C-alpha cells in the first residue's frame, strides 16, 4: 500500500476511542521490529517506517528514510510542535542520566530501547560525569543493530545487545548482559520512550514489574510515556497518536496519567518531583519560552527501588 494512502488522514477517519487504536497496535510492538541476533547480514527495510528512524527524523537526525520522514512530516503538519516533544524526551534522558551519575553511586545502566545514536548518548553523559559507568544498550531495530552497534559500543564499558525489551527475561537473563552488569549491585534501568510503543500481554505494568523484580535494592528506574492529559490538550495527543498508529510505523499510545501510574510497581519510590511533564523534571533553568500543547503530552519520572 502506498505510504500516502496509509498516512493520509481525513477528519472522519480520526479514532474516537482507544479501542480502534488498540486494535491497530495489538501485536505490533514485537512484530513491527525484527528481533535478530542471528548471524549474517541484518536487513534494514526502506519500505516500512521504524520507531527508531521516525524518532531520529523527528529529532532532526539523518539516519532515516523517506518512509520515516513522511510519518514525521504528517505528524508535523497536524501538530507543528511535535519535534519539541521528541527533543523533550531526549533532554529528559540527559538530565536523568546526569542526576544518576552525580547524585547516586549507581554506575551501571541498562538502557532498553536505545534508539539510533545521537548527540548525547547515555554512555557519553554517564561516563563524562562518573568515568567508571558501564552501559548496556538494548534494541531490536535492524537500523540500530546495523549502525548503532559500532557507534554505541565505543569502549569496553559500553555494550550493545539485540533483544526484545518487552520480554524482560530475554534481557535480564541474557548471558552477555549478565557477564557485563553485576545484578547484585544497583543498576539504573531506562525505559525511555518505549512503553507507549507497546500494548499487549504481558501488560506494560507486568513488564515493568518483571524488570524491577530483577533489580537489586537501591536501583533506579527512569521512565517516560506519552500522555493523554484528559483536558483541552487531549485533541493534540489523539492527533499525534492517530498518525503514529495508522502510519507504516504502527505504534504510539497516549495513555492517561492513571494508566501510566498503574505501571509503577510498589517497590519504587518516586524521586522528587515525581511523575511530571518532561520539561518540569529538574529543568536546566526557568521555563522562559511558552510550553506547547504537544510538550504537555508526555510524563517522565525517576524512581528508586526500596
Ligand atoms: C522512541 S525510541 C527511544 C530512544 C531513547 N530511549 C530515547 O528516549 O531517546 C524507541 C526505541 O525503542 C526500540 N524498541 C521498540 N520496541 C522494541 C522492542 N520490542 N525491543 C527492543 N527495542 C525496541 C526502537 O527500536 C527505538 O529505538
Image (spheres, rainbow, N blue to C red):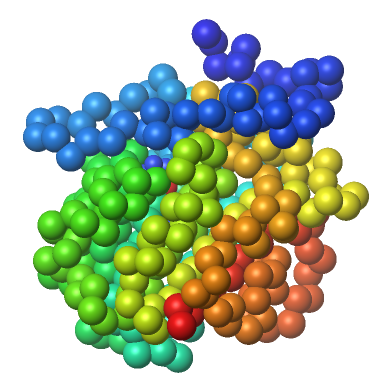
Relative to 246, is 97 above or below? below
Where is 5 relative to 139, above or below? above
Callout count = 0
15 to 275, vertically: above or below: above
31 displayed left or right of 2: left
Relative depth, front residue between 232 and 76: 232
Q: Quadrant of residue 37?
A: top left
Q: What x and y, as percent, mark residue 278?
A: 65, 66
| Residue drawn at (14%, 35%) of the image | 38
Nearest the viewer among 4 and 262 is 262
Where is residue 225 shown, x and y percent of the image?
60, 55
Residue at position x 28%, y 52% from top? 169
Does residue 22 lie above or below 161 as drawn?
above
| Residue name at image x 63 percent, y 41 percent | 253
Which residue is situated farthest in the left direction here?
A: 39
Q: Residue at x 17, y 64 (%)?
A: 178
Where is residue 284? Give x, y as percent. Answer: 62, 81
**Outermost residue to the right:** 232
Give x and y (percent) for residue 218: 39, 84
Q: Is residue 217 visible?
A: yes
Q: Is residue 147 visible?
A: no
* Front residue (pair 58, 36): 36
7 to the left or right of 188: right
Quarter of the image where one finds residue 45:
top left
Amino acid at each position: 500500500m502506498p505510504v500516502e494512502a496509509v498516512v493520509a488522514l481525513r477528519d472522519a477517519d480520526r479514532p474516537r476511542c482507544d479501542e480502534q487504536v488498540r486494535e491497530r497496535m495489538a501485536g505490533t510492538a514485537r512484530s513491527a521490529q525484527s528481533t535478530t541476533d542471528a548471524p549474517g547480514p541484518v536487513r534494514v527495510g526502506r519500505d516500512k517506517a521504524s520507531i527508531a528512524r521516525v524518532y531520529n527524523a523527528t529529532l532532526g537526525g539523518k539516519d532515516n528514510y523517506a518512509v520515516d520522514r513522511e510519518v514525521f512530516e504528517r505528524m508535523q503538519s497536524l501538530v507543528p510542535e511535535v519535534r519539541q516533544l521528541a527533543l523533550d524526551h531526549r533532554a529528559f534522558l540527559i538530565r536523568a542520566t546526569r542526576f544518576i551519575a552525580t547524585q547516586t553511586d549507581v554506575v551501571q545502566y541498562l538502557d532498553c530501547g536505545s534508539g539510533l545514536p545521537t548527540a548525547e548518548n547515555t554512555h557519553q553523559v554517564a561516563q563524562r560525569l562518573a568515568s567508571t559507568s558501564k552501559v548496556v544498550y538494548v534494541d531490536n531495530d535492524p537500523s540500530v543493530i546495523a549502525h548503532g552497534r559500532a557507534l554505541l559500543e565505543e569502549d569496553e564499558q559500553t555494550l550493545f545487545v539485540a533483544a526484545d525489551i518487552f520480554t524482560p527475561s530475554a534481557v535480564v537473563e541474557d548471558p552477555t548482559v549478565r557477564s557485563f552488569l553485576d545484578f547484585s549491585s544497583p543498576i539504573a534501568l531506562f525505559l525511555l520512550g518505549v512503553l507507549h510503543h507497546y500494548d499487549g500481554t504481558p501488560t506494560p505494568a507486568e513488564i515493568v514489574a518483571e524488570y524491577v523484580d530483577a533489580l537489586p535494592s537501591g536501583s533506579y528506574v527512569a521512565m517516560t510515556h506519552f500522555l493523554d492529559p484528559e483536558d483541552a490538550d487531549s485533541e493534540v495527543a489523539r492527533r499525534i497518536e492517530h498518525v503514529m498508529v495508522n502510519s507504516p510505523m504502527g505504534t504510539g499510545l497516549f495513555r492517561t496519567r492513571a494508566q501510566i501510574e498503574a505501571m509503577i510497581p510498589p517497590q519504587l519510590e518516586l524521586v522528587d518531583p515525581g511523575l511530571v511533564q518532561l520539561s518540569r523534571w529538574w529543568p536546566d533553568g526557568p521555563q522562559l519560552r511558552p510550553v506547547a500543547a504537544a510538550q504537555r503530552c508526555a510524563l517522565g519520572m525517576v524512581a528508586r527501588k526500596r
